[in-house]
Amino acid sequence: MPATSTCERELIRATLNDLSGTVTLRSYTSDVDSTYSRAERALLEAIAAASPKISLEILADRWNGARERDVGIARTPAIVLLGDRDYGLRYYGLPDGYELPAFLGTIRAVAERRSGLSSASVERLRTLTVPCHLEVFASPT
């Protein structure tokens, strides 16, 4: 059985085949091989193969608190999405199933250098005077 289904591969291809900018997916994962880590790697490889504008870096190492703190990740597995700069986007877990379309949309937004926020939201965010940490949790249930 393929690591990604035909339906997933078609969704990936259709969403990412005409990106306007480059994106780097940097995966921080454990150095311990597992079914989960193999599935994550296969999915990320399928995503990277969908466009010459996507590059994939896999960092399968032991946890290094100083390094992880420097790149802004709190746990692994983590995927850092980078465009022309680091926008602070971190994805924890496997972006599979119901989460795949949203993850692909985020890649597309990074490639297009757009947030998807309304101009009113952007203006309101500009009024923030202190750093803020935002986490979004998704569950298929």
Image (cartoon, rainbow, N blue to C red):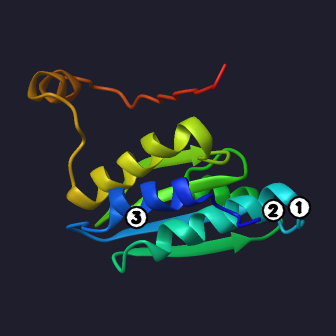
Q: Earlier in the sequence, mark 3 or mark 2?
A: 3
Q: Amino acid at mark 3?
A: Arg
Does residue 13 lie above or below 118 as drawn?
below
Label 2 environment density (alpha carbons within 10 Å; few <14, some 14–19, many ≥20)? some
Q: Is residue 65 above or below residue 38?
A: above
Real-space Cα separation, disc 2 to disc 1, in angstroms: 9 Å
Q: Are marks 2 and 1 in contact (CB under 8 Å)?
A: yes
Whole-percent x, y for residue 13 in the image: 40, 64
Graded by Cα atoms within 10 Å as few (under 14), some (14 to 19) or many (20 or more), the crowding at tag 3 reads some
Task: Decide if residue 10 is on the left or right side of residue 118.
Answer: right
Q: Give the position of the N terminus as an image quadrant.
A: bottom right
Residue nearer the viewer, 85 or 101: 101
Say which of 93 and 51 sits in front: 51
Residue 100: where, in percent of width, then height?
A: 52, 45
Q: What residue do we see at 51% from left, 62% from top?
A: 9
Question: To which quarter of the image does residue 44 belong?
Answer: bottom right
What residue is disc 3 on? Answer: 13
Q: Which residue is mark 2?
A: 30
- Name the element at disc 1: loop
**Lower position in the chain sequence, tag 1 or tag 3:** 3
Q: Give the residue displayed 67% in from the left and 67% down from the top.
A: 42
Q: Quadrant of the C terminus?
A: top right
Q: Position of residue 125 (x, y in %)?
A: 23, 26
CB atoms of marks 1 and 3 within 8 Å: no
Mark 2: secondary structure: loop
Separation of marks 3 and 2 at Cα, in angstroms: 28 Å
Residue at image mark 1: 34
Quadrant of residue 129 within the rendered picture: top left
Q: Amino acid at mark 1?
A: Ser
Q: Residues within 10 Å of mark 1 (few under 14, many from 20)?
A: few
